[in-house]
């Protein structure tokens, strides 16, 4: 069972059309975004991280976060 923060983070990541920042997770109601992402990773959810951007279930190519955010 996931914590409420991890469940909310997972919901936000699943709905996202692209990378999500920690600030966006926080703005979406996740009180402790870093802990929530760590919990998701510990429970086997594939969360890619690059330069502060997160994405669920896909592998980011090098430079992806920079290209996606301008």
Image (tube, helix red, strand yellow):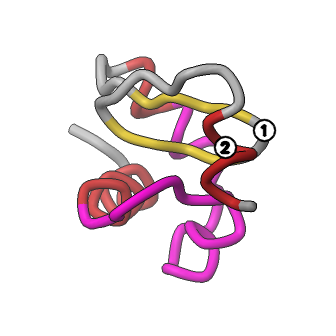
Within 10 Å of the Cα at label 2, are there few (<14), some (14-19), or many (20+) other Cα atoms? many
Which numbered disc covers residue 16? none
What span is in magenta? 15-38
Classify residue 46 by image quadrant: top left
Classify residue 24 by image quadrant: bottom right
Circle 1 SS class: loop
Q: Is residue 23 magenta?
A: yes
Quarter of the image with the C terminus is bottom right
Question: What residue is rendered at 40% in x and 50% in y?
Answer: 6
Which numbered disc covers residue 51? 1
Question: What residue is rendered at 43% in x and 57% in y?
Answer: 18
* Residue 56 % position (x, y): 36, 39
42 with respect to 62 (left or right): left
* Residue 39 % position (x, y): 47, 32
Circle 2 SS class: helix
Judge by depth and name the residue closer to the eye, 47 or 32.
47
Residue denoted by label 2: 65
* Residue 9 % position (x, y): 41, 57
| Vertical placement of residue 55 versus 24, above or below | above
């Amino acid at each position: 069972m996931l914590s409420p923060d991890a469940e909310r983070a997972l919901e936000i990541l699943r709905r996202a059309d692209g990378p999500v920042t920690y600030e966006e997770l926080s703005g979406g109601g996740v009180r402790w975004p870093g802990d929530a992402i760590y919990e998701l990773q510990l429970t086997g959810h594939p969360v890619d991280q690059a330069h502060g951007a997160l994405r669920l279930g896909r592998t980011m190519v090098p430079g992806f976060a920079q290209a996606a955010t301008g």
